[in-house]
Amino acid sequence: MQRTVTDVTIVGSGIAGSVLSLLLKRRGIKHVLLAREERKSIQLSETLPPSTLPLLEQMDLLELFEESSSRTFGYHSIWGSEHVISDDFFNHNPFKFGLKLDKPKLLGEFRKLNQDNILSFNSLLDVDVIDGRAFVTIAVEKEEHLIESKLVIDATGRNSAVLKQLGVLTESFDELISFTCHLPFKKHPNLIHKVFVESFEQGWGIVSSLNKEINVMTIFTQKGSAVHQQLKSYRNWNDILQPTQGLKFFLEENYEAKVIGGNANSSKASKIAGNHWLSLGDAAISFDPLSSHGVSNAIYCANEAANSIQVFLEKGATQSLNDYGHKLSSIFQAYLEHKSKLYNTEKRWSDSSFWQNARTTSTENRREPISSVSDQKI
Ligand SMILES: Cc1cc2nc3c(=O)[nH]c(=O)nc-3n(C[C@H](O)[C@H](O)[C@H](O)COP(=O)(O)OP(=O)(O)OC[C@H]3O[C@@H](n4cnc5c(N)ncnc54)[C@H](O)[C@@H]3O)c2cc1C
């Protein structure tokens, strides 16, 4: 078995893990970034709001993100009434635009910058913390490889793969699920911006252009709702979205789109950091995509984690890791309140169980912690 000894092992090379690796490299902190072979999934069209750009600028990452994005100047929504509302970013300060990420390109750029620290692997076999040392065992082309370090970081997104191995449970605050497909690009004649959101009786949907050829459409509903099973097949989308004003416009007739389901619930690790480990991004706290803050959260966590890790390595004090955990917990609490306010601005469909659940405060919806929801079938 091959063996590597380092200071920090990051598991997961999405945005959270990649940003953290770059920040540790800049600080001269010895680490390994474990990058699993990417599995095929549908490309999303994620947006960073203007409010995140000052953080990127402060972290000296704005240029890198801009090079792998296009600018976006606002979005439209039909939410809470039948009228179209526009949020125009040119009213925002100091940045009057947001970014639409080309995530594969961005992650490719990070891979180049982090290449000296990357260890590619096929599967995560085991994670353990024994006597103040973290041990991660991975499979690389059928060979086992052991990485020993002072700290192990879970950056595996909603899979929370490291937390699972450490026996840390994930608390779920709702049962939101998503169904996404790619459709031929269409521009609505009355809409300027390329992002459109609309609520309907059993959930809500978003259309966001990926490029000049593709619109990404995602419909969100609640597990077990009247449309949950039907949404799995694109053939049913036309019927489901008939009552909408705008979403139905973006559908393509006589078209076979592949629909990919996933979890989109709000969740939080029951413990975000502990002795010799911490979690970040979606693995620590994951947000409802309505917030449009998942990627911003991953960046913010990586920045905070880099500070805590440096203090931990220099002073050996686990307090910095606990402080990091508390900070993220309070951010998540504030997020839950904000989310509840957002859903409460939609007062229509008082009999719909989706809206009844969405409007109740998320802490009332809190589920018993489970080891993780993301591997469950939708
Ligand atoms: C439909 C939808 C739309 C969204 N839209 C937006 C948006 O507009 N704006 C926004 O900011 N956010 C949006 N989000 C949220 C955003 O995508 C996530 O919050 C963000 O990507 C989280 O980054 P992460 O690095 O924490 O996790 P991930 O991006 O999930 O990265 C996790 C990494 O860990 C790896 N990994 C997973 N399991 C294992 C394992 N067992 N072993 C090893 N490696 C593993 C994965 O391969 C991946 O590289 C959206 C989410 C959804 C579902």
Image: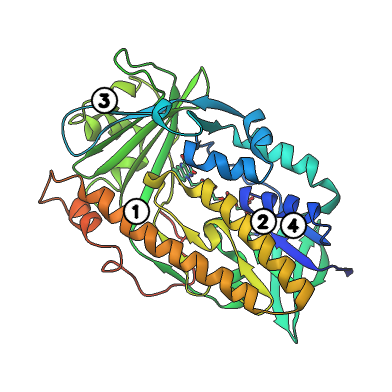
Measure the alpha-carbon separation of dots 1 and 4: 29 Å
Contact? badges 1 and 4 (CB < 8 Å): no
Measure the alpha-carbon separation of dots 2 and 4: 6 Å
Circle 3 sits on which residue?
246
Please state, as top left, top right, bottom left or bottom right, where the N terminus lies in the image: bottom right
Residue at position x 32%, y 41% in the image: 231
Circle 1 sits on which residue?
176
N-terminal of the pair, mark 4 or mark 3, is 4
299 above or below 97?
Answer: below
Measure the alpha-carbon separation of dots 3 and 1: 22 Å
Image position of 306 (left or right of 292): right
Residue 287 in percent (x, y) is at 43, 54
Circle 4 sits on which residue?
34
Circle 2 sits on which residue?
12
Based on the displayed image, in which of its 4 quarters is residue 74 positioned? top left
Residue 37 in percent (x, y) is at 71, 49
Residue at position x 45%, y 60% in the image: 376
